[in-house]
Amino acid sequence: MRKAKRQKKKIRIWVLPLLVLILLGVFIRINTRYWNGKDKIYLVQQNGDGSVTVKVYDPTLEEVIALQIPGDTEVSVSRNLGTLRLKNVWQLGINEGLGGKLLTETVTKNFLFPVFLWRGVEGETNLPLGDRLCLKFFDIKTRNSERTEIDLWKSQFLKKMKLTDGETGYKLQGEMSERLTVYFVNEDLEGKKIYIKDATGTAGIGERVGEVIEVMGGKVVTIEKAAPEDSDCLVTGDLSKKIARVFSCTVGKGKTDFDLEVVLGRQFAKRY
């Protein structure tokens, strides 16, 4: 009898921790939107010293790539908000009511890195709690193994010179090299045929969007210039969400003759 009671007690002792683990797993799953253990996740992090880190979490290769961009790099700010040092974009985003979104848009526009997730100095972020926990676990897992840090100011991609404000800083030297953009290739998009309809009425926007999509692995086969339309951005086709998230586009439900079709209008040009 006593032996049976001891066995029941042992079972009760293990039930509670097991229940907690099950509930924790369910909670994380419900609150996870982007991490699936397969696809890469790209995150822009604003640092306290003004610099910006673009992190690539690659669960397939089990590695984290950190691209360090100095805060004194001159950039063209998205939404036609002028030319600034990168370290000033975060505060401008707050002033404009955009939060870290302005920083991700500006990084994408200038460096071609397809980012839309962000984290601030005080921990503010647009990442759901489940994704934050998953990335934290992944950070811990790779902390002593597969981690690569690349300082852009130590490379040929940035050049130190006098900036528009008259003080010394860094400027981008031409287009970003494949040595950096290769980290952002998405296997699901690799080789997919992309059609872009540019109805923005603004020169160069369709081409620039196409460059970002090609960094993600897509193959832009056509950029059609069309009469300006008073619309924003629409992406139609398989895997359209992956493109739509980067450019804050609407996902279309129609059919297309291409793997993906991207339509850009004048409203998109105003915020690019």
Image: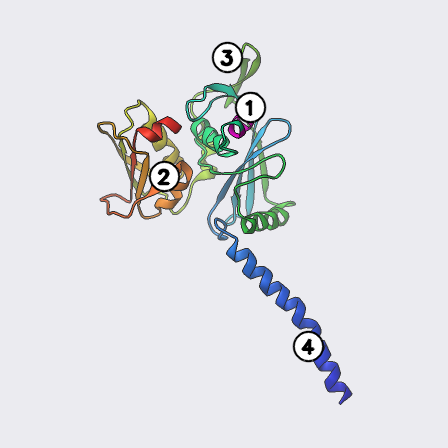
Question: In the figure, 220 relative to 34: above or below?
Answer: above
Residue occupying the point 53% across, 12% down:
165
Q: Nearer the viewer, residue 271 or 43?
A: 271
N-terminal label among 2 and 4: 4
N-terminal label among 4 and 3: 4
User: Magenta stretch?
Assistant: 88-94
Identify residue for label 2. Answer: 249
Residue occupying the point 50% across, 23% down:
157
N-terminal label among 2 and 1: 1
**Mark 3 surroundings within 10 Å by alpha-carbon count, few (fewer than 14), some (14 through 19), many (20 or more):** few
The image position of residue 214, as x and y in percent, is: 37, 35
Q: Nearer the viewer, residue 185 or 10?
A: 10
Identify residue for label 3. Answer: 164
Identify residue for label 1. Answer: 88
The image position of residue 77, as x and y in percent, is: 46, 24
**Which mark lies nearer to you, 4 or 1?**
1
Identify residue for label 4. Answer: 11
Mark 4 residue element? helix
Mark 1 residue element? helix
